[in-house]
Image (cartoon, rainbow, N blue to C red):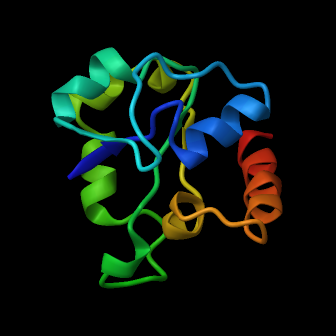
């Protein structure tokens, strides 16, 4: 399953507050489920924040899970604008980002700054 974190999602709203351009698609607090092929038209930004459901990983020490790397290696992923600069952002704990709280926001902002540097 792929979830597009729309501008109304907690992550989308935070990124908007940080000055990033909002994604065009509307949705709710949790984003919108989309087909993989829809990423080509929906994910048009300079970077793509990829959140991995770390609760489902078989090896939490694996830096990029095989199924995520397989997606990043597809022709579809290579057509995304973020691929032009190689800017796929993979936070260490996707769940901590997806389920933002007052305590985790500063940690995410620090991690995002480091990943974008």
Residue 87 drawn above or below residue 31: above
User: In the shown orientation, is residue 72 left or right of residue 82?
Assistant: left
User: Is 5 left, or right, of 100 in this rendering?
Assistant: left
Place of residue 114 in the rendered image (x, y in percent of width and height, measured from the top left): 79, 51
Residue visible at 68% across and 66% down in the picture: 101
Count the labels in the image: 0
At which x and y percent is residue 33?
Answer: 25, 42
| Viewer-closest of 78 and 55 | 55
Q: Residue at x 47, y 47 (%)?
A: 29
Relative to 21, does residue 100 appear above or below in the rendering?
A: below
> Quadrant of the image for the C terminus?
top right
Q: Locate residue 9 relative to residue 102 in the image: left or right.
A: left
Q: Is residue 92 above or below residue 39?
A: below
Q: Residue at x 30, y 27 (%)?
A: 39
Q: Position of residue 115 (x, y in %)?
A: 71, 48
- Outermost residue, front side: 28
Indicate left or right for 13 with 73 as reference: right
> Residue at horizontal 79%, vertical 65%?
107
Instruction: Determine the image quadrant of residue 5.
Output: top left
Residue 116 at x, y = what percent? 73, 40
Query: In the figure, 18 relative to 111: above or below?
Result: above
């Amino acid at each position: 399953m792929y979830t597009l974190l729309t501008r109304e999602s907690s992550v989308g709203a935070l990124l908007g507050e940080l000055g990033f351009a909002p994604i065009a698609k509307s949705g709710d607090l949790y984003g919108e489920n989309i087909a993989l092929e829809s990423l080509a038209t929906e994910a048009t930004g300079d970077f793509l924040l990829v959140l991995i459901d770390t609760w489902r990983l078989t090896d939490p020490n694996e830096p990029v899970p095989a199924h995520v790397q397989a997606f990043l290696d597809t022709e579809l992923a290579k057509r995304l604008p973020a691929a032009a600069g190689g800017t796929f952002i993979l936070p260490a704990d996707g769940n901590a980002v997806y389920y933002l709280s007052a305590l985790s926001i500063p940690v995410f902002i620090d991690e995002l700054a480091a990943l974008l540097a």
